[in-house]
């Protein structure tokens, strides 16, 4: 393995900026004690004007095995469009070994870690402007068990304000909702970058320093000299507004990409790739929605037909039950009438037979007549509470 090249981030002691004095290797090793998904290391040509030479992947693998003894922990390797090589690993020691390289494929190289994958950024407010950044960093690290990588104060020149917000970058992708500073629990606010445009072509995809296009007017999107005379036209969405408008769909899309970058701790390019992939899936779902609507209508019609069939069968069953009930009621009433008539006849016979031996001939003659009358006369109550025929 090549001799390790220390990379010190440096320490700046003032009231506006602070950077940790730990080297990149030390910070990466410290990141292994925090929560993160992956570590990405970029290998590029030491001469910024040149790209790394393209090589057979098998040769690259053989070289990596020679200089990185923890090469088994490399999850992915790919050549980028900028002529660099990106290594992905979850092992901090493996990442440090890659960061320590100074040559690769007979070429002097520089290595850098992508901090977005292993760091979080947030804002705290109302920090006195006369507070040294080094003192603030020591307070945050001592009271909250956080490793501060960088801090930057948002303060305009010649400002007379006594306090200002401070942007803080710490190791780890999981941070608390509040931190303790000088006995005060202060709520933190996740920091989301604002969309930045190239000042030459007004694209959101690259910075001005690497733009190779001609200067255009942000109002009409045309190349001209002097005051703009044409109607407003956005160079990004072709809409009737200037390229710097906050209502531009391209600006709104870029804001969503930066939000995706913040919440998922990924690079801007990776966030842009994920965003386009999500939109492509959504558009496919929208295209297939008419078929879903048609299927829903078919299911609704079949359900309504089934419900109508069930209602018809229920009504038919209810009518049949009513008819049978009416027939059974009529049969029961007829049987009851016949039973009562038979009982009355038997009672009449019993009474007649019981009187044949004890009743005088004259009373026997009147008995049938009196029995016939008793069935049609109203009932009266005697002194003992018994009902007797009113004869």
Image: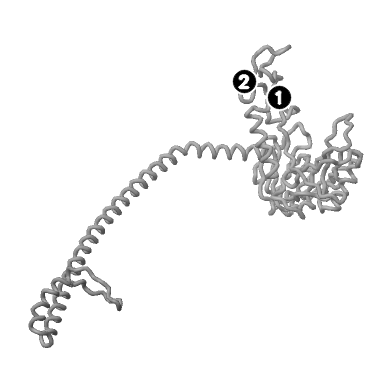
- Residue 250 lies, with reference to residue 338, above or below; the image says above
Viewer-side residue, 287 vs 294 = 294
- Please provide percent x and percent y for residue 218: 69, 20
Residue 252 at least partly seen:
yes
In the figure, residue 195 lies in which quadrant?
top right
Question: CB of mark 1 within 8 Å of CB of mark 2?
Answer: no
For residue 274, side relative to residue 28 (left or right)? left
- Please provide percent x and percent y for residue 16: 87, 37
- Please provide percent x and percent y for residue 58: 65, 46
Q: Residue at x 8, y 78 (%)?
A: 365
Q: Residue at x 15, y 71 (%)?
A: 373
Residue 114 at least partly seen:
no
Viewer-side residue, 224 vs 248 = 248
Viewer-side residue, 135 vs 352 = 352
Where is mark 2, residue-wise?
240
Question: Mark 1 or mark 2: which comes first in sequence?
Answer: 1
- Residue 310 lies, with reference to residue 352, above or below; the image says above
In the figure, residue 250 lies in which quadrant?
top right
Where is mark 1, residue-wise?
212
For residue 182, side relative to residue 310 (left or right)? right
């Amino acid at each position: 393995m090549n001799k390790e090249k220390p990379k010190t981030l440096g320490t700046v002691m003032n009231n506006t900026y602070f950077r940790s004095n730990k080297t990149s290797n030390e910070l990466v090793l410290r990141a292994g004690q925090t929560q993160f998904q992956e570590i990405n290391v970029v290998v590029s040509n030491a001469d910024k004007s040149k790209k790394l030479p393209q090589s057979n992947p098998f040769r690259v693998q053989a070289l990596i095995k020679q200089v990185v003894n923890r090469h088994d922990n490399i999850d992915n390797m790919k050549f980028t469009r900028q002529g660099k090589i990106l290594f992905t690993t979850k092992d901090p020691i493996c990442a440090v070994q890659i960061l320590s390289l100074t040559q690769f494929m007979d070429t002097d190289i520089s290595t850098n870690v992508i901090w977005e994958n292993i760091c979080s950024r947030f804002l705290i407010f109302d920090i006195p402007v006369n507070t040294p950044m080094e003192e603030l960093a020591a307070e945050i690290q001592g009271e909250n068990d956080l490793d501060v990588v960088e801090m930057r104060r948002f303060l305009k020149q010649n400002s007379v304000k006594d306090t200002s917000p401070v942007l803080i970058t710490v190791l780890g992708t999981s941070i608390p909702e509040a931190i303790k500073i000088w006995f005060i629990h202060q709520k933190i606010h996740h920091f989301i970058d604002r969309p930045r445009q190239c000042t030459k072509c007004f694209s959101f995809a690259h910075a001005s320093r690497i733009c190779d296009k001609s200067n255009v007017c942000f109002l009409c999107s045309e190349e001209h000299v002097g005051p703009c005379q044409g109607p407003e036209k956005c160079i990004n969405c072709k809409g009737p507004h200037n390229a710097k408008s906050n209502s531009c769909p391209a600006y709104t899309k870029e804001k969503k990409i930066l939000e995706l970058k913040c919440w998922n701790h990924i690079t801007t390019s990776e966030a842009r790739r994920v965003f386009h992939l999500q939109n492509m899936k959504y558009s496919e779902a929208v295209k297939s929605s008419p078929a879903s609507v048609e299927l829903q209508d078919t299911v609704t019609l079949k359900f309504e037909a089934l419900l109508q069939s069930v209602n018809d069968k229920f009504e038919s069953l209810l009518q049949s039950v009513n008819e049978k009930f009416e027939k059974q009621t009529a049969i029961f009433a007829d049987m009851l009438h016949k039973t009562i008539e038979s009982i009355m006849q038997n009672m009449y016979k019993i009474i007649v037979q019981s009187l044949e031996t004890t009743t005088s001939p004259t009373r026997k003659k009147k008995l049938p007549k009196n029995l016939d009358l008793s069935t049609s006369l109203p009932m009266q109550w005697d002194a003992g509470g018994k009902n007797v025929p009113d004869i």
